[in-house]
Image: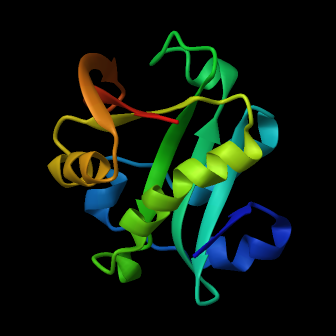
Amino acid sequence: MQFYFYHERFKDAINQYQLDEEQLRFTGEPKDCIKLSNEDSERSSILAIENDELVTFFVLHSNEGVKPYSDNEYAILLRAFSTDFRHQRKGFAKKALTQLPAFVKENYHEINEIVLAVNVGNEAAQALYEKCGFIDEGERRMGRKGELIIMSYYL
């Protein structure tokens, strides 16, 4: 699996990316995320490509983006994490999360923590994040789609 920062050459892959209704309860559409990334230099849209196919998408949000969830100025927020509906349950999300710390260390040298916010109702995602080394230290916030569990991965 290779990670790429979004570039226009990936536009067709993004347009073909599919999320089902259940996924959309908890995450944003990659097209919308890319639009926000283009308008905000603190957001980077990242594509996880396996065998020339876009299988997983996420955003890394630094500085202002992470502030509602962490006081650590050296933290980065993982947001809008999703796997294309057609590629779910094939281990791609786990593979992406396992490779994420090395990618962050390589591209964001000052970062020492990856923070994410997962909906209380999204138990499958919580279990996956835990399996991949994210820790729930009891922090909770209210989000647009309900109560959020704040989880951290320390680099």
Looking at the image, residue 149 lies above or below residue 142: below
Residue 54 visible in the snapshot:
yes
Looking at the image, residue 150 lies above or below residue 128: above
- On the image, the x and y values in percent for residue 97 come to 44, 56
Name the quadrant of the N terminus.
bottom right
Residue 96 left/right relative to 85? right
Looking at the image, residue 143 lies above or below residue 31: above
- On the image, the x and y values in percent for residue 116 come to 42, 35
Q: Residue at x 70, y 38 (%)?
A: 43
- Residue that extends furthest to the top in the rendered view of this protein: 71
- On the image, the x and y values in percent for residue 79 come to 50, 42
- Residue that extends furthest to the bottom in the rendered view of this protein: 51
Q: Residue at x 44, y 59 (%)?
A: 98
Q: State the residue in front, 133 or 81.
A: 133
Which quadrant of the figure has residue 66?
Answer: top right
Q: Residue at x 48, y 47 (%)?
A: 80
Residue 134 left/right relative to 131? right
Q: State the residue in front, 25 or 148.
A: 148
